[in-house]
Image (cartoon, rainbow, N blue to C red):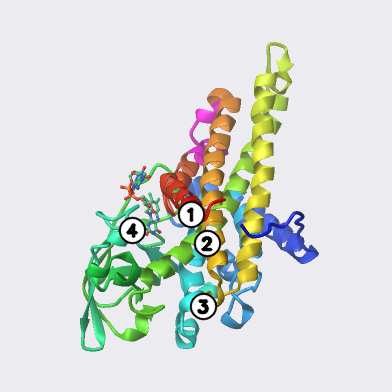
Amino acid sequence: MSSVAIEFGFTPDQEAFRASVREFLKREVEPIAGRIDEEERFPLESVAKMREEGYFGVPIPEEYGGLGLGKIGYCLLLEEVGRVDASHSAILGAHTSLGAVPILYYGTEEQRRRWLVPAARGEKLLAFSLTEPGSGSDSGAVQTTAERSGDDFVLNGTKIYVTNGKEADTVLVLAGTDVKLGPSGGVTAFLLDQGLEGFRVGRCEKKMGLHGTSTAELVLDHVRVGPERVLGGVGKGFHVAMSALDVGRVSLGAGSIGAIEASLGASLEFAQRRTQFGLPISEYQAIQFKLADMAMRARALRYLVYQAAARQDRMGNDPAAWSRLDRAEKTRESATVKCLASEWACEAVDEAVQIHGGLGYIRGTAIERAYRDARILRIFEGTNEIQRVVVARDLLARGL
Ligand SMILES: Cc1cc2nc3c(=O)[nH]c(=O)nc-3n(C[C@H](O)[C@H](O)[C@H](O)COP(=O)(O)OP(=O)(O)OC[C@H]3O[C@@H](n4cnc5c(N)ncnc54)[C@H](O)[C@@H]3O)c2cc1C
């Protein structure tokens, strides 16, 4: 196992970025988050303002249109957004870690200029499409095909549950180029623009939470594309997808810190105000222990998340330069973060509802919305069962 940092602090610039994000969210997102949830619509107004702030390109280097704040800056952003509204986190996450970062990692210079620069500037929205009706956790079993036709590829299939799928200008789509080879070698990543002939948005799902995001079906009916849309090389799609998910899982962990701290903040405030049996409920140990658990977990997660983000920053943006050890550590670490963070976030919002009593169950409160929104954290970007498979597999292969 490689060495771990024993001390971690943010630079003044990182703290200043966090403060400016917090102020932005208070002004632009907090006031509309409840309404967006109620109306079940994509938050066009705040997305436009996030674009002006550069939030769609936080970890992308400045030479490609981003803010150049690395994975640490990106996690700071998502931690703060996670305090306020999970739909905004999901929109940013699908675009950035699952859409833009793989283009940064695997794109040719031409692809970066064509797709990454406008995405990092927020002029174009991205999405990531791996899941299919028959292939979820078993993501290597994609049924969507990309058959060669001269220099071109012709794609056919149906993708589901694509976050940003309805609004995205470009979707990173995984398709099978050689089914016999399976995930490693048989799957290829393509950059598909909306408007390509035969490529269309199908049904959009109604959901328990994340009402500000679209979760769309994408239909590919003989979509003909040239080789310039292949990202990372033919047969390399699974690597592209997995390294995107490594980044996404850590940023999901950052958002979970935000969700836990928001639950804790609301619960602390409520518990000291709400009196029963002649005392504020915060005087009862049963309530204090819930608050303490939330606080301990948020603190522990902060180390895990930013340790993982710092590793990814240190490794840099060229996958060819990553050592085998760094790759393995990165993957185990991101699975660990994702699994623990999402479980602790779900427990925190659940306990926050409990502390709020009946009020926590009433539609329209931030706690009730957070409770519905948090549940997906244990499912998307790989279910937690799959995160445990990843950790166990690595344990068995490499030991502790
Ligand atoms: C709101 C939302 C947004 C999403 N956004 C995106 C997106 O942007 N892009 C995208 O590609 N996908 C997206 N997804 C899909 C998501 O990643 C999948 O739903 C998830 O990976 C699980 O796949 P599945 O739904 O097919 O469940 P299944 O894989 O069918 O799993 C069902 C159950 O079986 C368990 N299971 C499966 N295999 C194993 C095993 N080997 N060992 C133990 N347990 C196992 C699972 O953990 C789960 O509990 C989204 C989903 C939702 C609901």
- Residue depicted at 42% across the width and 51% down the height: 380
**Residue at mark 1:** 394
- Residue depicted at 64% across the width and 51% down the height: 304
Label 1, label 3: how many angstroms apart (C-alpha)?
A: 21 Å
Q: Residues within 10 Å of mark 1 (few under 14, many from 20)?
A: some
Mark 1 vs 4: CB contact within 8 A: no
* Comparing labels 3 and 4, the label whose residue is closer to the camera: 3
**Residue at mark 3:** 320
Question: 181 left or right of 50?
Answer: left
- Which residues are drawn in magenta? 359-371
Disc 4 C-beta below 8 A from ligand 1: yes
Q: Position of residue 343 (x, y in %)?
A: 52, 40
Label 1, label 4: how many angstroms apart (C-alpha)?
A: 18 Å
Which type of secondary structure does the marked residue at label 4 adopt? helix
Q: Where is residue 272 in the image (x, y as percent from the top left)?
A: 73, 26
**Is 364 in the magenta?**
yes
Question: 296 left or right of 157?
Answer: right
Q: Where is residue 148 in the image (x, y as percent from the top left)?
A: 22, 81
Q: Position of residue 140 (x, y in %)?
A: 32, 61
Which type of secondary structure does the marked residue at label 3 adopt? helix
**Residue at mark 4:** 139
Mark 2 vs 1: CB contact within 8 A: yes
The circle drawn on residue 328 is 2
- Identify the amino acid type marked 2: Ala
Which type of secondary structure does the marked residue at label 1 adopt? helix
Q: Residues within 10 Å of mark 4 (few under 14, many from 20)?
A: some
Label 3, label 2: how many angstroms apart (C-alpha)?
A: 14 Å
Mark 3 vs 4: CB contact within 8 A: no
- Residue depicted at 52% across the width and 74% down the height: 319
Is residue 32 visible from the viewing direction of this image? no
Which type of secondary structure does the marked residue at label 2 adopt? helix
Judged from this view, the residue extending furthest toward the top is 277
